[in-house]
Image (tube, rainbow, N blue to C red):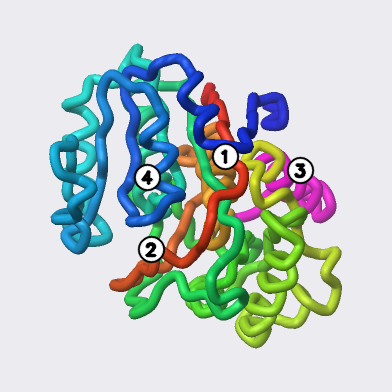
Amino acid sequence: MNYTYLYKHHYSDTEELSKLDEYDVFITMFVDSSRVKEPASKINSHFTLWLTTEIDKDNVFLLGKNVFVLQGNEDFVNLFSKLNSLQLKGKNVCIDSTGFRVQYLLFLMRCLLINNVKRYDVIYTEPVLYRCAENTEFSANFYQVKELMGMSGVSSSITSNDLLIIAAGYDHSRIIDVAKHIKNSKKVLLFGFPSLSPDMFQENILRAHEAETDLGAACFANMDSNIFAPAYDPFVAAETIKEYIEKEENKVGKPFTHIYLAPLSSKPHAIAMGLYFLCEFGWTKPMSVIYPFCNTYFPDNSDGISKIWRYTVEVP
Protein backbone atom coordinates (compact mmCIF):
# COMPACT_ATOMS: atom_id res chain seq x y z
CA MET A 1 0.00 0.00 0.00
CA ASN A 2 1.26 3.46 -0.89
CA TYR A 3 -0.04 5.75 1.83
CA THR A 4 0.61 8.90 -0.20
CA TYR A 5 -2.28 8.00 -2.50
CA LEU A 6 -4.77 8.77 0.28
CA TYR A 7 -6.71 12.00 -0.04
CA LYS A 8 -6.08 15.18 1.93
CA HIS A 9 -7.18 18.76 1.59
CA HIS A 10 -6.60 21.95 3.54
CA TYR A 11 -8.77 24.99 4.23
CA SER A 12 -7.71 28.49 5.11
CA ASP A 13 -10.85 29.31 7.10
CA THR A 14 -13.13 27.26 9.35
CA GLU A 15 -16.14 28.63 7.42
CA GLU A 16 -15.17 26.37 4.52
CA LEU A 17 -15.97 23.32 6.66
CA SER A 18 -19.67 24.24 6.57
CA LYS A 19 -19.70 23.40 2.86
CA LEU A 20 -18.79 19.74 3.46
CA ASP A 21 -21.47 17.09 3.08
CA GLU A 22 -23.24 16.16 6.29
CA TYR A 23 -21.66 13.38 8.34
CA ASP A 24 -23.67 10.75 10.17
CA VAL A 25 -21.39 10.95 13.21
CA PHE A 26 -18.85 13.57 14.25
CA ILE A 27 -16.56 12.75 17.20
CA THR A 28 -14.38 15.34 18.89
CA MET A 29 -12.64 15.78 22.25
CA PHE A 30 -13.24 18.98 24.14
CA VAL A 31 -10.47 21.46 24.83
CA ASP A 32 -11.40 25.01 25.75
CA SER A 33 -9.67 26.39 22.67
CA SER A 34 -10.78 28.04 19.45
CA ARG A 35 -8.89 25.32 17.55
CA VAL A 36 -11.46 22.80 18.80
CA LYS A 37 -14.64 24.84 19.24
CA GLU A 38 -14.68 26.79 15.98
CA PRO A 39 -14.28 23.86 13.54
CA ALA A 40 -16.91 21.85 15.44
CA SER A 41 -19.41 24.70 15.05
CA LYS A 42 -19.04 24.49 11.26
CA ILE A 43 -19.21 20.73 10.74
CA ASN A 44 -22.63 19.45 9.65
CA SER A 45 -23.47 16.15 11.33
CA HIS A 46 -26.55 14.18 12.25
CA PHE A 47 -25.00 13.30 15.62
CA THR A 48 -22.04 14.91 17.39
CA LEU A 49 -20.30 13.25 20.32
CA TRP A 50 -18.11 15.31 22.62
CA LEU A 51 -15.58 13.37 24.65
CA THR A 52 -14.31 15.13 27.73
CA THR A 53 -12.71 14.53 31.11
CA GLU A 54 -13.80 15.11 34.69
CA ILE A 55 -11.85 18.37 34.65
CA ASP A 56 -13.85 19.89 31.79
CA LYS A 57 -17.22 18.16 32.03
CA ASP A 58 -18.94 21.18 33.61
CA ASN A 59 -17.68 23.69 31.07
CA VAL A 60 -20.53 25.96 29.94
CA PHE A 61 -19.70 25.23 26.29
CA LEU A 62 -20.78 21.60 26.73
CA LEU A 63 -24.26 22.40 28.05
CA GLY A 64 -26.94 20.75 25.94
CA LYS A 65 -24.44 18.70 23.93
CA ASN A 66 -24.00 14.93 23.69
CA VAL A 67 -21.14 14.41 26.13
CA PHE A 68 -19.27 11.29 27.21
CA VAL A 69 -17.00 11.73 30.21
CA LEU A 70 -13.76 9.75 30.19
CA GLN A 71 -12.65 8.59 33.60
CA GLY A 72 -8.92 9.26 33.64
CA ASN A 73 -6.27 8.40 31.07
CA GLU A 74 -7.16 4.78 30.36
CA ASP A 75 -10.93 4.53 30.22
CA PHE A 76 -10.83 2.32 27.14
CA VAL A 77 -13.48 -0.25 28.07
CA ASN A 78 -16.16 2.38 28.65
CA LEU A 79 -15.23 4.25 25.48
CA PHE A 80 -15.39 1.02 23.47
CA SER A 81 -18.87 0.37 24.83
CA LYS A 82 -19.99 3.90 23.98
CA LEU A 83 -18.67 3.65 20.43
CA ASN A 84 -20.40 0.30 19.94
CA SER A 85 -23.69 1.89 20.99
CA LEU A 86 -23.39 4.34 18.07
CA GLN A 87 -23.57 1.43 15.58
CA LEU A 88 -20.95 3.01 13.36
CA LYS A 89 -20.81 0.34 10.66
CA GLY A 90 -21.93 1.79 7.34
CA LYS A 91 -21.98 5.35 8.63
CA ASN A 92 -20.12 8.39 7.35
CA VAL A 93 -17.81 9.33 10.24
CA CYS A 94 -15.60 12.33 10.90
CA ILE A 95 -13.14 12.80 13.78
CA ASP A 96 -11.58 16.05 14.88
CA SER A 97 -8.17 14.96 16.12
CA THR A 98 -7.11 18.42 17.32
CA GLY A 99 -8.10 18.18 20.97
CA PHE A 100 -7.69 14.43 21.41
CA ARG A 101 -5.30 12.84 23.84
CA VAL A 102 -3.17 10.58 21.67
CA GLN A 103 -4.05 7.36 23.52
CA TYR A 104 -7.75 7.89 22.87
CA LEU A 105 -7.29 9.02 19.27
CA LEU A 106 -5.40 5.87 18.27
CA PHE A 107 -7.77 3.68 20.27
CA LEU A 108 -10.64 5.27 18.37
CA MET A 109 -8.95 4.41 15.06
CA ARG A 110 -8.68 0.79 16.20
CA CYS A 111 -12.32 0.75 17.31
CA LEU A 112 -13.47 2.05 13.94
CA LEU A 113 -11.71 -0.85 12.23
CA ILE A 114 -13.24 -3.32 14.69
CA ASN A 115 -16.64 -1.83 13.79
CA ASN A 116 -15.79 -2.30 10.11
CA VAL A 117 -15.54 1.43 9.43
CA LYS A 118 -12.66 1.43 6.99
CA ARG A 119 -13.08 4.87 5.48
CA TYR A 120 -13.56 8.08 7.45
CA ASP A 121 -12.41 11.68 7.62
CA VAL A 122 -10.08 13.15 10.23
CA ILE A 123 -9.61 16.88 10.60
CA TYR A 124 -6.73 18.68 12.27
CA THR A 125 -6.45 22.41 12.92
CA GLU A 126 -2.95 23.87 13.00
CA PRO A 127 -2.06 26.51 15.59
CA VAL A 128 -0.41 29.78 14.58
CA LEU A 129 2.13 29.29 17.37
CA TYR A 130 2.79 27.53 20.65
CA ARG A 131 2.48 30.09 23.40
CA CYS A 132 5.80 29.40 25.13
CA ALA A 133 7.78 28.43 22.01
CA GLU A 134 10.33 25.67 22.78
CA ASN A 135 9.40 25.87 26.47
CA THR A 136 5.80 24.85 25.83
CA GLU A 137 4.66 22.07 28.18
CA PHE A 138 2.27 19.36 27.08
CA SER A 139 2.31 16.91 29.97
CA ALA A 140 3.62 16.31 33.49
CA ASN A 141 3.58 13.75 36.29
CA PHE A 142 4.64 10.80 34.13
CA TYR A 143 3.85 7.39 35.57
CA GLN A 144 4.35 4.62 32.99
CA VAL A 145 5.18 3.74 29.38
CA LYS A 146 2.62 1.28 28.05
CA GLU A 147 1.47 -0.31 24.83
CA LEU A 148 -1.67 1.45 23.67
CA MET A 149 -4.89 -0.51 24.00
CA GLY A 150 -5.55 -2.36 20.74
CA MET A 151 -2.17 -1.39 19.33
CA SER A 152 0.03 -4.28 20.42
CA GLY A 153 1.16 -7.24 18.35
CA VAL A 154 2.88 -10.51 19.09
CA SER A 155 5.66 -10.51 21.67
CA SER A 156 8.98 -12.31 21.65
CA SER A 157 11.81 -12.88 24.08
CA ILE A 158 14.27 -12.07 21.28
CA THR A 159 15.29 -8.40 21.39
CA SER A 160 18.57 -8.46 19.48
CA ASN A 161 17.27 -6.34 16.59
CA ASP A 162 14.52 -4.16 18.07
CA LEU A 163 13.66 -0.80 16.53
CA LEU A 164 12.19 2.21 18.33
CA ILE A 165 10.84 5.06 16.18
CA ILE A 166 9.98 8.14 18.22
CA ALA A 167 7.89 10.87 16.63
CA ALA A 168 9.80 13.55 18.49
CA GLY A 169 7.90 16.60 19.71
CA TYR A 170 8.65 19.37 22.16
CA ASP A 171 8.16 17.17 25.22
CA HIS A 172 11.75 15.99 25.65
CA SER A 173 10.94 14.45 29.05
CA ARG A 174 8.53 12.05 27.37
CA ILE A 175 11.18 11.17 24.77
CA ILE A 176 13.49 10.27 27.66
CA ASP A 177 10.76 8.17 29.32
CA VAL A 178 10.24 6.12 26.17
CA ALA A 179 13.97 5.77 25.40
CA LYS A 180 14.63 4.46 28.92
CA HIS A 181 11.77 1.98 28.63
CA ILE A 182 13.05 0.44 25.38
CA LYS A 183 16.75 0.50 26.17
CA ASN A 184 18.18 -2.24 23.98
CA SER A 185 17.01 -1.08 20.58
CA LYS A 186 18.03 0.88 17.54
CA LYS A 187 16.56 4.33 18.13
CA VAL A 188 15.56 6.78 15.43
CA LEU A 189 13.64 10.05 15.58
CA LEU A 190 10.83 11.09 13.27
CA PHE A 191 10.90 14.87 12.95
CA GLY A 192 8.21 17.07 11.47
CA PHE A 193 9.91 18.68 8.48
CA PRO A 194 8.55 20.77 6.96
CA SER A 195 7.02 21.75 10.29
CA LEU A 196 3.79 23.66 10.92
CA SER A 197 5.94 26.82 10.85
CA PRO A 198 9.69 27.44 10.40
CA ASP A 199 10.16 28.37 14.05
CA MET A 200 8.57 25.13 15.23
CA PHE A 201 11.21 22.92 13.59
CA GLN A 202 14.01 24.81 15.35
CA GLU A 203 12.11 24.68 18.64
CA ASN A 204 11.52 20.97 18.17
CA ILE A 205 15.21 20.21 17.59
CA LEU A 206 16.22 22.27 20.63
CA ARG A 207 13.89 20.31 22.91
CA ALA A 208 14.62 16.88 21.45
CA HIS A 209 18.37 17.47 21.83
CA GLU A 210 17.88 17.53 25.60
CA ALA A 211 17.14 13.81 25.41
CA GLU A 212 20.47 13.00 23.72
CA THR A 213 21.96 11.15 26.70
CA ASP A 214 19.15 8.59 26.73
CA LEU A 215 18.73 8.37 22.96
CA GLY A 216 22.41 7.99 22.18
CA ALA A 217 24.61 10.34 20.20
CA ALA A 218 23.80 8.71 16.85
CA CYS A 219 20.48 10.53 16.54
CA PHE A 220 22.23 13.91 16.65
CA ALA A 221 25.76 13.24 15.38
CA ASN A 222 24.27 12.49 11.97
CA MET A 223 20.86 14.07 11.58
CA ASP A 224 20.43 12.26 8.26
CA SER A 225 20.12 9.00 10.20
CA ASN A 226 16.70 10.16 11.39
CA ILE A 227 13.38 10.28 9.54
CA PHE A 228 11.78 13.46 8.23
CA ALA A 229 8.19 13.89 7.10
CA PRO A 230 5.81 16.88 7.02
CA ALA A 231 4.35 17.55 10.46
CA TYR A 232 0.92 18.08 8.87
CA ASP A 233 0.79 15.03 6.59
CA PRO A 234 0.00 11.62 8.14
CA PHE A 235 0.08 9.87 4.78
CA VAL A 236 3.57 10.96 3.76
CA ALA A 237 4.72 10.23 7.33
CA ALA A 238 3.27 6.69 7.22
CA GLU A 239 4.90 6.05 3.85
CA THR A 240 8.22 7.41 5.14
CA ILE A 241 8.05 5.08 8.16
CA LYS A 242 7.32 2.12 5.88
CA GLU A 243 10.19 2.97 3.53
CA TYR A 244 12.64 3.43 6.40
CA ILE A 245 11.77 0.05 7.94
CA GLU A 246 12.03 -1.75 4.59
CA LYS A 247 15.35 -0.07 3.79
CA GLU A 248 16.91 -0.94 7.16
CA GLU A 249 15.69 -4.54 7.06
CA ASN A 250 17.09 -4.98 3.54
CA LYS A 251 20.39 -3.45 4.65
CA VAL A 252 20.99 -6.03 7.40
CA GLY A 253 19.20 -8.86 5.61
CA LYS A 254 16.77 -9.70 8.40
CA PRO A 255 13.56 -8.31 9.89
CA PHE A 256 13.44 -6.34 13.10
CA THR A 257 12.70 -8.51 16.12
CA HIS A 258 10.18 -5.91 17.31
CA ILE A 259 9.11 -2.50 16.03
CA TYR A 260 8.02 0.09 18.59
CA LEU A 261 6.26 3.26 17.44
CA ALA A 262 6.04 6.16 19.91
CA PRO A 263 3.77 9.06 18.80
CA LEU A 264 5.07 12.02 20.79
CA SER A 265 4.76 14.89 18.31
CA SER A 266 1.99 16.33 16.12
CA LYS A 267 -1.44 14.69 15.83
CA PRO A 268 -0.86 14.00 12.11
CA HIS A 269 2.27 12.03 13.03
CA ALA A 270 0.29 10.12 15.65
CA ILE A 271 -2.32 9.34 13.00
CA ALA A 272 0.51 8.17 10.73
CA MET A 273 1.75 5.68 13.31
CA GLY A 274 -1.77 4.43 14.02
CA LEU A 275 -2.48 4.10 10.31
CA TYR A 276 0.77 2.24 9.66
CA PHE A 277 0.02 -0.19 12.50
CA LEU A 278 -3.52 -0.87 11.25
CA CYS A 279 -2.71 -1.14 7.54
CA GLU A 280 0.25 -3.43 8.20
CA PHE A 281 -1.93 -5.62 10.49
CA GLY A 282 0.42 -4.84 13.34
CA TRP A 283 -1.54 -6.93 15.84
CA THR A 284 -0.35 -10.04 13.92
CA LYS A 285 3.31 -8.94 13.92
CA PRO A 286 6.05 -8.06 16.43
CA MET A 287 4.92 -4.43 16.45
CA SER A 288 3.56 -2.07 19.13
CA VAL A 289 2.50 1.52 19.53
CA ILE A 290 3.73 2.72 22.92
CA TYR A 291 2.99 5.87 24.87
CA PRO A 292 4.23 7.54 28.08
CA PHE A 293 1.15 8.03 30.26
CA CYS A 294 0.98 11.06 32.53
CA ASN A 295 -1.42 12.27 35.18
CA THR A 296 -1.41 15.85 33.90
CA TYR A 297 -1.92 17.25 30.40
CA PHE A 298 -1.82 20.87 29.22
CA PRO A 299 -4.09 20.93 26.16
CA ASP A 300 -4.59 24.69 25.80
CA ASN A 301 -1.04 25.72 24.93
CA SER A 302 -1.40 27.40 21.54
CA ASP A 303 -2.78 30.56 19.98
CA GLY A 304 -4.66 31.16 16.76
CA ILE A 305 -5.90 29.03 13.90
CA SER A 306 -3.75 28.47 10.84
CA LYS A 307 -4.75 25.85 8.26
CA ILE A 308 -7.45 23.21 8.77
CA TRP A 309 -6.64 19.83 7.25
CA ARG A 310 -9.04 17.06 6.25
CA TYR A 311 -7.58 13.60 5.82
CA THR A 312 -9.56 10.73 4.34
CA VAL A 313 -8.28 7.61 6.09
CA GLU A 314 -8.74 4.28 4.31
CA VAL A 315 -7.79 0.98 5.91
CA PRO A 316 -7.72 -2.37 4.06
The answer to whether mark 3 and mark 1 are in CB contact below 8 A is no
Which residue is at a point 54% across and 24% down the rendered structure image?
314
Disc 4 residue crowd, few under 14, some 14–19, many 20+, Cα 10 Å: some
Q: Nearer the viewer, mark 2 or mark 4?
A: 4
Q: Earlier in the sequence, mark 3 or mark 1?
A: 3
Residue under numbered circle 1: 308
Q: Which of marks 2 and 1 is nearer the N terminus?
A: 2
- Residue 164 in sight here: no
Q: Which mark is residue 243?
A: 3
Give the CA separation, mark 2 to mark 1: 31 Å
Foreground: 267 or 142? 267
The answer to whether mark 4 and mark 3 are in CB contact below 8 A is no
Q: Where is residue 161 in the image (x, y as percent from the top left)?
A: 65, 62
Disc 3 residue crowd, few under 14, some 14–19, many 20+, Cα 10 Å: some
Q: Earlier in the sequence, mark 2 or mark 4?
A: 4
Say which element carries label 4.
Answer: helix
Q: Earlier in the sequence, mark 4 or mark 3?
A: 4
Which residue is at a point 85% across and 64% down the rendered structure image?
224
Which residue is at a point 64% across and 34% down the rendered structure image?
10
Is 180 covered by the magenta stretch? no
Give the CA separation, mark 3 to mark 1: 27 Å
Q: Which mark is residue 37?
A: 4
In the picture, measured across the screen, residue 168 lies left or right of residue 144, that is: right
Q: Position of residue 3 (x, y in %)?
A: 67, 31
Foreground: 23 or 278? 23
Residue under numbered circle 2: 146
